[in-house]
Amino acid sequence: MKAKIALITGGYTGEAEVSFKSSAFVNSQLDHDKYDIYLITVTKEAWYYEDLDGKRHPISKADFTLPLHGDILTFDLAFIMVHGVPGEDGRLQSYFDLLDIPYTSCDALTSALTMNKGYTKAILSDIPELHLAKSVLLFESQRPEALKIVESNLSLPYFVKPNAGGSSIGMTKVKESAQLQEAIDKAFDAENTGKQVIVEEFVTGREFSEGIFRNSKGELVVLPATEVRTTREFFDYEAKYVPGLTEEITPADLTVEQQERAARILREIYVRLNCKGMVRVDFFLENDTDKFYFIEINTIPGQTPQSFIPQQVRAFGMKEGDFYGELIETALQSK
């Protein structure tokens, strides 16, 4: 009997648009002869499965079952493809833990922690060979004095971003003090990002993104890195999802020593944060020092056709469908 997989998409933030594209690509690559795939949309208004006729069938939130054509379908696994809230911050993971349904992503604690950029940096602060840009974490209660806090602790230019956001939504590069207040307000007001803001000193260097996952044999596999070169001021939402604005080189032009150093760092990050499934780590290689600077970790990385992970999987010599199948089989083993 084929395993029934709930491929979950949507979400409660502006990242839902990306989630729909990611889940559509994953669905197109998975082996439907091996798995029964049901695309489940999660929004604030409803959770549902839409059949081929366009009819929506509500999910029972009490036990995550699907009443369909007189039957009650249960799922063997949740393949979570929801970027942002509630798929990347631990909420869905907690829900599935309560129902004893395995899933493909990191667990609830790791998901919640890694959505908080400031807290994540604190956990990773002593990893050998990994460097962290100087930063301040701002809470809503500090909003009236945020400008003073930033300017008394950091030097221009800054990156200002929601502490619990993704897809570069609400992010601004600030090159002069007059821009700072608007950037802070933009980050604080980004929808469903926790009303916290992180401000970091800018690191001048090459930008990279690299995936790592644990396969069904229990091995940690580091994928080839991607270098990001954008015509934008920085790698913002448009640069990520508008064709032609960014050049992405996979595999990246790194020396053997740099590749090995990056792999050591990624494995340590994965273990230190108790990650599961696939994650993606973004980092800078500083121009003058050759030091790797941590940017952030993404526990539900994008899977659109142009996303980094699919590029890296292909560069690794693996088919995307086999890769997603490996994530499913690894998660099923944990049941």
Image: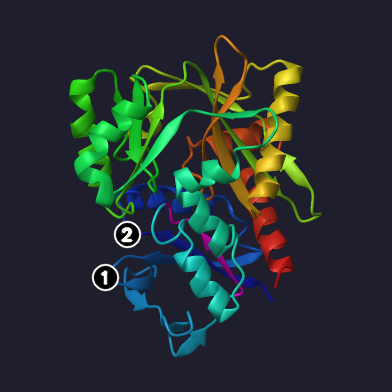
Distance of mark 2 from mark 1, alpha carbons? 9 Å
Q: In the image, what residue type sits under mark 2? A: Tyr
Q: Position of residue 191 (x, y in %)?
A: 26, 52
Residue 172 visible in rendering? no
Q: Tag on residue 70?
A: none
According to the picture, the residue beneath numbered tag 1 turns out to be: 45
Instruction: Look at the numbered disc 1 and give the secondary structure of its residue.
Output: loop
Q: Earlier in the sequence, mark 2 or mark 1?
A: 2
Quadrant of the drawing holding the C terminus = bottom right
Rate crowding at label 2 as few (under 14), some (14 to 19) or many (20 or more) other CA atoms within 10 Å.
some
Rate crowding at label 1 as few (under 14), some (14 to 19) or many (20 or more) other CA atoms within 10 Å.
few
Q: Position of residue 120 (x, y in %)?
A: 53, 46
Give the magenta part as a residue range: 76-83
Residue 9 visible in rendering? yes
Asked whether 81 or 107 is in front, the reply is 107
Relative vertical location of residue 287 with respect to residue 187 in this rendering, above or below: above
Quadrant of the drawing holding the N terminus = bottom right
Relative vertical location of residue 14 with respect to residue 158 in this rendering, above or below: below
Asked whether 67 or 131 is in front, the reply is 131
- Which colour assignment does the render follow? rainbow
Q: In the image, what residue type sits under mark 1? A: Glu
Instruction: Name the residue: 57% across, 57% down.
Output: 110
According to the picture, the residue beneath numbered tag 2 turns out to be: 12
Instruction: Look at the numbered disc 2 and give the secondary structure of its residue.
Output: loop
Name the quadrant containing residue 102: bottom right
Q: Is residue 82 magenta?
A: yes
Relative vertical location of residue 213 with respect to residue 225 in this rendering, above or below: below
Q: Position of residue 33 (x, y in %)?
A: 64, 63
